[in-house]
Image (spheres, grey):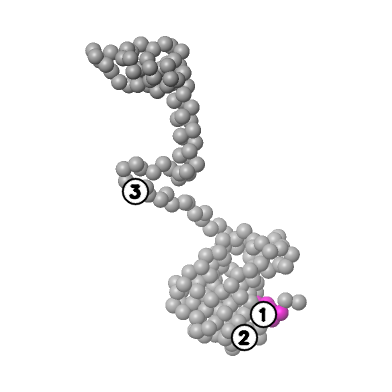
């Protein structure tokens, strides 16, 4: 064995020297003999390193280890599909709120004929309630040349919305209106309530 290897072994670099002996060949391309205990020590040493390397990559790249020779691609997260019956709301012309997919007072609420609707601005508040559930939602409708909606819990007892999916789109039914979809439980109903002028 070359003298420099023996010299390094004497300085406490045995692990690295043993690796050197294993992966590089000398003279007649024969590997140096090493003691069985040293070989086992090397295996344990590398197993320890590999274990922590795997933990590091799992922590740093939870969606997968990036490719070393190319740009990594983002893995899209699967979104939860909405469940329940979609109640769909939108505005028509400048004085009508329309809905479908839910029972209640009707499928059109007109500013001209409904006493609880106001012409323009904060037009109306609709309430969706579901059987057997204390918490429902209020839908506040606004008209400013365009129709838009705001959703909030209907009960003051809790600040949390019910676990109903809400989907917002723009211009999918009328070009000047937001389309609001509330996936509420079967048997839900909608009604117009008095607009909330003050929180008393």
Residue behind mark 1 = 195
Q: Mark 3 touching mark 2, by CB under 8 A?
A: no
Read off the residue under disc 2.
Answer: 118
Q: Which residues are magenta?
A: 192-198
Residue farthest to the left? 28
Quarter of the view holding residue 152: bottom right
**N-terminal label among 3 and 2:** 3
Q: Where does label 3 land, which residue? A: 71
Measured as percent of width and height from the top left, residue 21 is found at 34, 18
Secondary structure category for the residue under label 1: loop
Q: Nearer the viewer, residue 97 or 124?
A: 124
Q: Mark 1 and 2 residues: CB-CB less than 8 Å, in contact?
A: yes
One can see residue 191 in this view: yes
**In magenta stretch: residue 197:** yes
Overall secondary structure of the magenta section: loop
Q: Residue at x 48, y 38 (%)?
A: 56
In this rendering, would 138 be left or right of 83?
Answer: right
Q: Which mark is residue 67?
A: none
């Amino acid at each position: 064995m070359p003298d420099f290897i023996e010299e390094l072994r004497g300085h406490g670099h045995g692990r690295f020297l043993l690796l050197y002996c294993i992966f590089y060949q000398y003279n007649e391309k024969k590997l140096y003999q090493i003691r069985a205990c040293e070989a086992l020590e090397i295996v344990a040493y590398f197993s320890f390193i590999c274990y922590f390397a795997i933990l590091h990559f799992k922590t740093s790249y939870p969606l997968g280890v990036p490719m070393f020779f190319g740009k990594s691609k983002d893995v899209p997260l699967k979104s939860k599909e909405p469940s329940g019956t979609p109640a769909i709301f939108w505005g028509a012309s400048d004085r009508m709120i329309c809905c479908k997919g839910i029972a209640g007072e009707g499928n059109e609420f007109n500013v001209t004929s409904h006493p609880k609707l106001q012409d323009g601005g904060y037009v109306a508040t609709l309430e969706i309630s579901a059987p057997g559930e204390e918490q429902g939602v209020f839908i506040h409708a606004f008209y400013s040349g365009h129709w838009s909606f705001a959703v909030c819990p209907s009960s003051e007892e809790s600040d949390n919305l019910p676990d109903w999916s809400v989907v917002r789109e723009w211009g999918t039914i009328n070009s000047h209106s937001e389309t609001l979809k509330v996936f509420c439980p079967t048997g839900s109903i909608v009604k117009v309530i008095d607009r909330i002028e003050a929180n008393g």
